[in-house]
Image: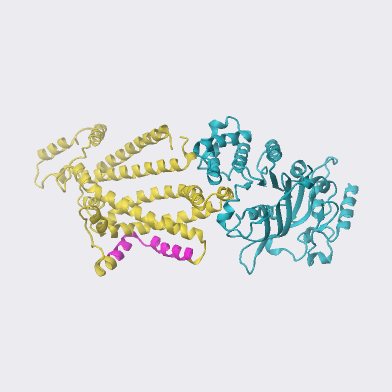
Chain colours: A cyan, B yellow
Amino acid sequence: MSQLEKETVLEVWHLRTEFGLPERPLVAVDDVSFQVRAGEILGLVGESGSGKSITLRSILGIVRPRGRVSGEILWKGRDLVPLDEASLRRVRGREIAMIFQEPMSSLNPLLTVGLQISENLAAHTELDAKARKARAIELLDMVGIPAARDRLGDYPHEFSGGMRQRVMIAIALASNPKLLLADEPTTALDVTIQDQILRLIQALSRDLGMAVILVTHDMGVVAETCDRVAVMYGGRLCETGPTADVIRDARHPYSLGLLRSIPRDVAPRTPLYSIPGAPPALNALPAGCAFTARCPVAGPECLDVRPSLEAAGRQRQVACHHREEALAHFSAREAAQ
Amino acid sequence: MPSLSYLLARLLQIIPTFLLVMIFIFLLVRLLPGDPAIAMAEAKATDAQLEQIRHNLGLDQPLPIQFLVFVKNTLTGDLGRSIMLKAPVTEIILDRLPTTIFLALYSVLLAICLAGPLAFLAASRVNGPVDVAIRSVFQVGLSMPVFYIGLVLLTVLAAQLRWFPVGGYGTGFLDNLHHLILPALSVALYTSAIILRNLRASLIEVLDADYVQFARAKGLSRRIVMTRHVLRNALVSTVTLLGLSIGNLMSGTLVTETVFAVPGVGRLMLEAIFARDYPLIQGLTLTFAVLVSVVFLLTDIVQSWLDPRLRQS
């Protein structure tokens, strides 16, 4: 069965998450819409502060109470936005699980990993203590932790970084979630370990039929792992599409810049491209396109008129007023090198 | 739980502490000006009589021998005789000690009951009106000396409103609770101000920690997130502070017990100092050292129970 025919499990429509005073809100996520199909891995790419992590945390409602979420988050047809904490708790960790960036700081340092897995099972299943223990061993085994049985009583500080990330994945998988939200799961790890963890997530997604939203700032990770990609900038989506297509033929000036900054087969000592400037602060976002200030092809209308995400070929969407110029600009650069 | 070997290792650490305390006390008493024999003897004692007293006290022996005798006597529970009260020091101290320990535990419990819930309240509404109000009130408590708080409580609650007794000690547990509420409260107000500040700060930090976000993302109930994940982590640093402030509180009893006329070891210490009752001062100093060491030992044990990272000795 191809990806196209699989059912859509998560639909996000016009998601907006803001913080701070209601009269002067800081908008971290603005009008973001995307869909995830069963078993699919969606990459959410962008720089730090682009709103990727907040998007994930908004889906589970854990940005509340400080963050205010609006829009629609349809999980198997049911909107999660209006749900109260008690109802959300039956989705969190049970149907939608999440893993965090820092395996060092995301596990409670005072509790054994056995307890941290089994409290998840206690919250979401009817298993008794003995069955929870058996399941915990099975989970640690599944994520590739050697001698799982002997490690239940160990504390997080007794594991290496990569092993802790595996433990976190085991906790997340405890009650067979249908969607895994992975917030930069490999950023804090060594390159070799990164690769192992990505392969593990891929294998688990395939074997368990679990959809994954993988947040990362690394296009290389996306290329290796994701079926589709959504590029975020300044809390908004710039471009979405199947990974291979976006990487081969990016359309938005930001994704073009991002892809150009990956070292590929260039001559030695050629300076690496980098997008000039820094991402905008949340309190200084323009009314128009968030990328205007750093964009090489921006026109006067870009600052005031927000480009909407429009279809650009099969399964692809781009939000830019100057697609042709962008493409021309970057191919000219390429040719010059 | 901390392992048995950790507990043993920690217990053994007490021995050098006590040895140092005993050397210190031993030298201190011998360095003080004046001759204990003259202090103990009657005014018209002859040289021969003084010599006899010195011999009885072992003061004619070389210092190292005297020290060994002191250690031996202390270990067998013989702290000498009080000059002022003309009774064995050990007996006097054992008679007065329960009152002080009762008062100390009472103050600590009151402090925890005051600071704990209020710290939670303040931390869950950072910089809101409730938080600011709680912090301001306790800031006042922190900036006033304990004896002053004590005097204010005494004047208002005991002398004017007559809700509580002015001083002294009751008979029986409940009567004690009633009699000691003002001294306990005046110490507790100060201690709770310290605990509140620390606990509030660590709660705010922990509430923001990744593992608490992760615990929420796991769909755990609010109760489990707050107790197992938030409170337990926040307590690690607060427990240390609590241990230190109990240590402080021990020396604070000198003042409190005097202000409220509580017959504990604190007031006894003050009386002994005024009367230059060296054996009693020596015995009381040792008692305080033991109490503080025990409190620190318990603090360490509680900490290593809370935090597995501290268990590697």
Magenta highlight: main SS: helix
- Counting labels gives 0
In the picture, measured across the screen, residue A264 lies left or right of residue B92, that is: right
Quadrant in the picture for residue B302:
top left
Task: State left or right for residue A301 relative to residue B214.
Answer: right
Q: In this picture, is A244 found above or below A60? A: above
Residue A273 in percent (x, y) is at 81, 49
| Closer to the camera in the image, A44 or A292 | A44
In this view of the protein, which residue sits in the foreground, A307 or B270? A307
Q: Does A13 lie within the magenta span?
A: no
Q: Nearer the viewer, residue A213 or B126?
A: A213
The quarter of the image holding the N terminus of chain B is top left
Q: Establish if A42 lies above or below A23.
A: above
The residue shown at (29%, 68%) is B156
Q: Residue at x 34, y 42 (%)?
A: B294
Pinpoint residue B256: horizontal percent, then vertical percent: 28, 57
Q: Is residue B248 visible?
A: yes
B145 magenta-colored? yes
Q: Is residue B247 left or right of residue A46?
A: left
Residue A137, above or below B31: above
On the image, the x and y values in percent for residue A146 come to 60, 30
In which quarter of the view is residue A226 placed? Answer: top right
| Residue segment shown in magenta | B130-154
Residue A108 visible, this angle: no
- List x then y, in percent, for residue B169: 22, 55
> At x 9% / y 43%, what residue is drawn?
B45
